[in-house]
Amino acid sequence: MGRSDKKSPHKAVALKYRAGADAAPRVVAGGRGLVAERILELARACNIPIHEDPDLVEVLSRLDLMTEIPPETYLLVAEVLAFIYRSNSSFSKS
């Protein structure tokens, strides 16, 4: 999902959303330091787009795993999902 610092990720959070099954995206992974780096490595290895937003990572990193994101973050997360959609569209055209 993202990291809080471009040089060394202090925090990273991963979200999962299943249309029709989930009411909102859920936090499925989160961590700092080496855990954050591993989350990003796995995302890269699986060709999952990474979006950097330190403020959003800060908010989402406070949530428990498998917790739906709070309504206050819907707009920010919608922007991330739009980024992912655009990334996937660009990838599929290649």
Image: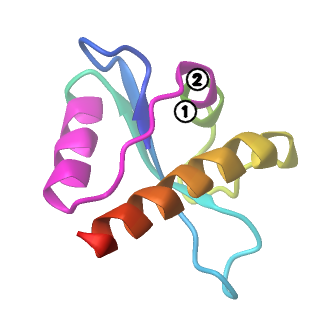
**Mark 2 element type:** helix
Query: Residue under circle 2?
Result: 58
Q: Residues within 10 Å of mark 2 (few under 14, many from 20)?
A: some
Q: In what quadrant of the picture does the N terminus appear?
A: top left
Q: Residue furthest right?
A: 71
Viewer-side residue, 42 vs 31 = 42
Instruction: Say whether residue 50 is magenta.
Output: yes
The stretch of residues the image draws in magenta is 35-56
Give the image location of residue 75, x and y in percent. 79, 45
The secondary structure making up most of the magenta span is helix
User: How far across and down, in percent of the image, does residue 22 sit?
Assistant: 68, 77
Judging depth in this view, the residue of 89 and 61 nearest the camera is 89
Q: Residue at x 65, y 56 (%)?
A: 67
Q: Are marks 1 and 2 in contact (CB under 8 Å)?
A: yes
Label 1: state its secondary structure: loop
**Amino acid type for the residue under numbered disc 1:** Ser
Residue occupied by mark 1: 61
x, y percent for residue 44: 19, 50
- Please state the horizontal and vertical placement of residue 91, each as a whole percent of the image: 30, 65
Q: Nearer the viewer, residue 49 or 11?
A: 49
